[in-house]
Image (cartoon, rainbow, N blue to C red):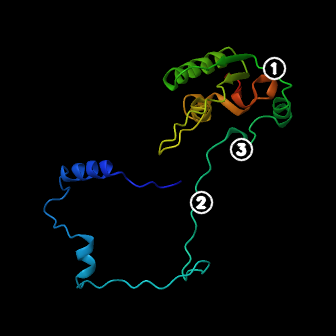
Amino acid sequence: MTRRRLTPDEIALWRKVARSTEKLHPDRGMVSPVARESEPSTEKRASIDPFEIGQKTGETRPVREQPSPARPTQETVRMDRKSFGKLKRGKLKPEARIDLHGMTIDQAHPALMSFIMREHAKGRRLVLVITGKGRVRDEGGPIPVRPGVLRHNLPHWLSTPPLSQLVLQVTDAHLKHGGGGAFYVYLRRPR
């Protein structure tokens, strides 16, 4: 990232904006950074030990690992291993499918819920949910935008009630059934 110098017009605009602002806490006195450095401080400042690159610190804190985002392929297998192997190789044919392409989150979530409940009531075991891979639509803003919003949210939707009681296994689909843009959802037996 290269930095550029502000033009005189931009500097004048910034000064105009800065003059029009109000203090957040007007009762507090404002001391400029220049005055703060030149005045002798009555407060006791903590001394900072010199530090060089590569040097280890004296104290060690336990590192808190961030949880990795839940991926359906990282889950434990909760269905029959033989059937799961056939499923991953694309040997099992889905009994029903839903295509969520072009839907918003507000449209896709209710459609998915009604589809899963309806197919479970019919006694179906393996259904295919097509989400698509998603478009890369990052405009370069300060907050990155995840491609594939539906693809990202689907495992979460299937792992929360009321669908969590109906779903036994969720995994990525085989290439002949959509690959990275689809999921196999293996449903529990109806009671």
Which is more N-terminal, label 2 or label 1? 2
Real-space CA distance between mark 3 and mark 1, rounded to the nearest whole angstrom: 22 Å
Is the residue 108 above or below the residue 41 in the image? above
Q: Nearer the viewer, residue 75 or 104?
A: 104
- Binning the other alpha carbons within 10 Å of mark 3 as few (below 14), some (14 to 19) or many (20 upward) gives few
Quadrant where the C terminus sits is top right
- What kind of residue is marked 1? Lys
Which is more N-terminal, label 1 or label 3? 3
Q: Nearer the viewer, residue 17 or 29?
A: 17
Q: Residue furthest front?
A: 8
Proximity of marks 2 and 3: CB atoms separated by less than 8 Å: no
**Residue 152, picture quadrant:** top right
Proximity of marks 3 and 1: CB atoms separated by less than 8 Å: no
Residue ID for mark 3: 74
Secondary element type, mark 3: helix
Residue ID for mark 1: 93
| Image coordinates for residue 110, horizontal then vertical, percent | 52, 21
The residue located at (27%, 71%) in the rendering is 33
| Image coordinates for residue 77, horizontal then vertical, percent | 76, 40
- What kind of residue is marked 3? Gln
Real-space CA distance between mark 1 and mark 2, rounded to the nearest whole angstrom: 39 Å
- What kind of residue is marked 2? Glu
